[in-house]
């Protein structure tokens, strides 16, 4: 079974809150879905985005702008 990917569109304040929780818990996070840019966020589509894995290995993503801007 392939891990699934879940993306959530959030406000800038929600992004800050979630990223803060990820950092407080010392979870690994990445700027890209392939986990090649650790401890970074991306600025795709003029917003911000970040990826991390849930305990089951699913890729979770939050973005502040929809795909394609």
Image (cartoon, helix red, strand yellow):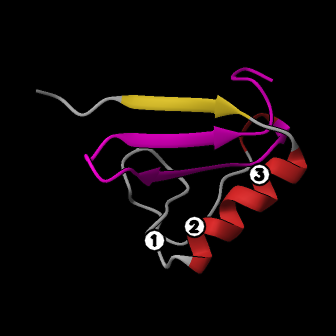
64 lies above or below 50: above
Q: Marks 3/2: CA distance? A: 11 Å
17 left or right of 42 in image: right
- Nearest the viewer among 51 and 20 is 20
Residue at left offset 17%, top offset 29%: 2
Instruction: Give the mark nearest the N terminus, 1 or 3.
Output: 3
Q: Which mark is residue 27?
A: 1
- Front residue of 17 and 39: 17
Which disc, if any, is residue 42? none
- The image's mark for residue 22 is 2
Quarter location, residue 27: bottom left
Query: Is 35 on the left or on the right of 29, as rendered?
Result: left
Q: Which residues are magenta?
A: 46-69
Image quarter of residue 35? bottom left
- Which quadrant is the N terminus positioned in? top left
Residue at which label 3 appears: 15
Q: How many C-alpha atoms fall within 10 Å of the one at disc 2: few (<14), some, or many (≥20)?
A: some
Measuring 36% from the left and 48% from the top, which residue is drawn there?
A: 34
Q: Position of residue 4 (x, y in %)?
A: 32, 29
Q: Quadrant of the C terminus?
A: top right
Disc on the earlier residue, 3 or 2: 3
Q: Is residue 4 above or below residue 49?
A: above
Circle 3 packing at 10 Å, graded few (<14), some (14-19), many (20+), is: some
Residue 21 screen position, x and y as percent: 64, 67
**Disc 2 to disc 1: CB gap under 8 Å:** yes
């Amino acid at each position: 079974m392939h891990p699934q990917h879940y993306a959530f569109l959030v406000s800038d304040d929600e992004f800050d809150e979630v990223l803060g929780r990820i950092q407080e818990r010392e979870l690994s996070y990445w700027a890209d879905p392939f986990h090649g840019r650790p401890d970074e966020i991306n600025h795709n589509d003029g917003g911000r985005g970040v990826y991390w894995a849930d305990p089951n290995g699913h890729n979770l993503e939050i973005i502040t702008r929809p795909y394609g801007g």
